[in-house]
Amino acid sequence: MLHLSETEKRVLVDESQPALAMAMRILVATAEILGASRLIAVASAHIDGCLYLGDSGVFFAEKLVQLGGRVAIPATLNVGALDLIHPHLVQAGTHHRSMAKRQMQAYLDLGCQASWTCAPYQTGHRPGLGENVAWGESNAVVFANSVLGARTNRYGDLLDICLALSGRAPYTGLHRPENRHANLVIDLSGLPGALKSSESFFPVLGSWLGRHAGASVPALTGFEAPVAEDHLKALGAGAASTGAVGMFHIVGQTPEAATLADALGGNPCAETLKPTLQDFRRERDRLSQQTGSQLDCVALGSPHFSYAETRALLTTLAGRSSRVPFYVCTNRFVLHKLEQEGLLEALARAGIELVIDTCVAVAPILRGKGGVMMTNSAKFAHYGPGNTGYQSVFGSLADCVDSAVSGKITRNPGLWQDQ
Amino acid sequence: MAGSVKARVLVAGRAQGVVLRLDAAVSFWGGVSPQTAEIIQHDHPNRGICISQRILLLPAMIGSSSSSAVLLELLYKKIGPKAILMTEIDAILVLGDLVAGEMGYPTIPILQVAADALQNGQAVTIEENGTIGF
């Protein structure tokens, strides 16, 4: 039974604030269905609903604008369906283009920030430990819960903006401390240390984790060294694309897992899985639909590439250039930094096309009617075939670069071999 | 009527039609075309079937958080199912229906039923109070 405060009840029928009342009605009805006992205040929002999927989504956001809606808390925006900086990149008809733009504009009119990124946590939006927030976009949700220790469920289209307008969320799921404890242990101690600190391991680990953890909260043990932030990002994104993982712990590193006992929170009967190198090789191979050498494009940056990842790309390129279209999806924050550091020219010379505000998996950017796309992202590899018509091939950053330079797929088994 | 079952009402409404019981869970986002209401998930056992105008019985839940927007789009285009019967509560789909109501689009009844309550192809009548007659 849902109990509302007097203020919340007043908002529901407040005719002087019709957008807020509408948001509250939708929120309260959802909270009742979820079985929440009350609503809680949330400190910030990350809104996924700004991506154009159909005209009704535009009309919904515009209705909130017409009714005078304004976000009550800081709210960043996930990707839209257009690159507003490089409008020529998205190949869509006039209707699609104009509706996608209207949808993005409506969310700005509601007071959201023009962040247009699926990695808001790398552009300054970093809620603190124990802070309740209302975030959408599965990878961002996992990162906020796991790495920052903020508390959010996965809030999707239509609901996310209602939470931002009201500053409230149903008190359920991962907002509740008892649901944040691990109920599954993943022991990685049997794997080679070099693999466990390599960039291409984490998307694969994430992909495997999503498939095996489902909606549980897994605690990972057996890392010898701290996992880098971009690797945590890749792990969460992989897990959220193959499963419903909303949070993980890395024992000894993430904020709610100083020890395994802390992560488990006294949970006595968590199952332990001990995957092998062979399991991960198999998972890595699931991320590719092709074994040939044909290569039509390379796409990196799902989640959006960070400044550090872009620097690593330039280092790996070492002055060479790509023979195939090579897309790097990132955000305005990183673009600005690259500009400041004078690196845009080097990227352009290498044939790298920066995609800003959106990404190749959600907007028609890849040219032609299909082919083979190589990526170091589990999320691109997973959604690529359905959303772009391109077959995916997964490889490390170095594999992607070497293949782009030669124009043919080459993959170095390197760290994945038995030691 | 040969019989009836009582279901939990998530969104109230009346409907009459034939049950389409899916053989596997489907994510509306990526799994159902918002243009044609057809099941488009490449490896779904009911791929190619149109859910429009049917009493859609979902055997399990699978949650993309954009599924709400796809249901809203189907209801806006008046090509949605006549009702949704879910065995597990999927708040994301319910949300699409609730927002349709706020937008002034026709809404559909959504009810929670037991997994074995109804069969594919059965003609049923859904009442406001959650009674499903067959």
Image: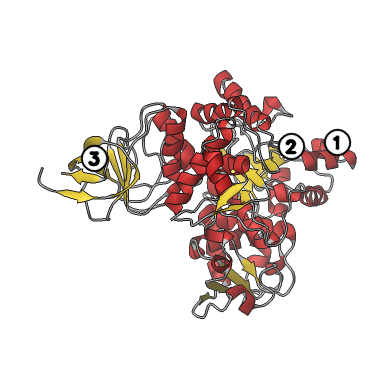
Under tag 2, what secondary structure? strand
- Which amino acid is tagged 2? Leu
Question: Residues under labels 3 and 1: Cα distance?
Answer: 66 Å
Earlier in the chain: of badge 1 and badge 2, it is 1
The type of residue carrying mark 3 is Glu
Question: Looking at the image, which is closer to me, A235 or A264?
Answer: A264
- Tag nearer the camera, 3 or 2: 3
Asked if badge 3 and badge 1 are on a common chain, one would say no
Residue sitting at the far top? A94
Mark 2: give few (<14), some (14-19) or many (20+) Cα within 10 Å: many
The image quarter in which residue A298 lies = top right
Dot 3 and dot 2 residues touching (CB under 8 Å): no
Q: Which of B101 and A304 is in front in this view?
A: B101
Q: Name the residue under label 2.
A: A354
Q: Name the residue under label 3.
A: B127
Q: In this view, does B80 lie above or below B61?
A: above
* Residue B71: x %, y % from top left: 42, 37
Nearer the observer: mark 3 or 1; the answer is 3
Q: Where is residue A379 in the image (x, y as percent from the top left)?
A: 59, 50
Quadrant assignment, res B80: top left
Q: Is residue A101 above or below residue B130?
A: above
Is there one chain holding both mark 1 and mark 2? yes
Q: Horizontal placement of A144 versus B52: left or right?
A: right
Q: Nearer the viewer, mark 1 or mark 2?
A: 2
Q: Name the residue under label 1.
A: A345
Where residue A112 appears, as percent x and y from the top left, is 68, 37
Residue B17, position as x, y percentages in the image: 22, 36
Asked whether the viewer can see residue A22, the reply is: yes
Q: Can residue A158 be seen in this view?
A: no
- Quarter placement of the C terminus of chain A: bottom right
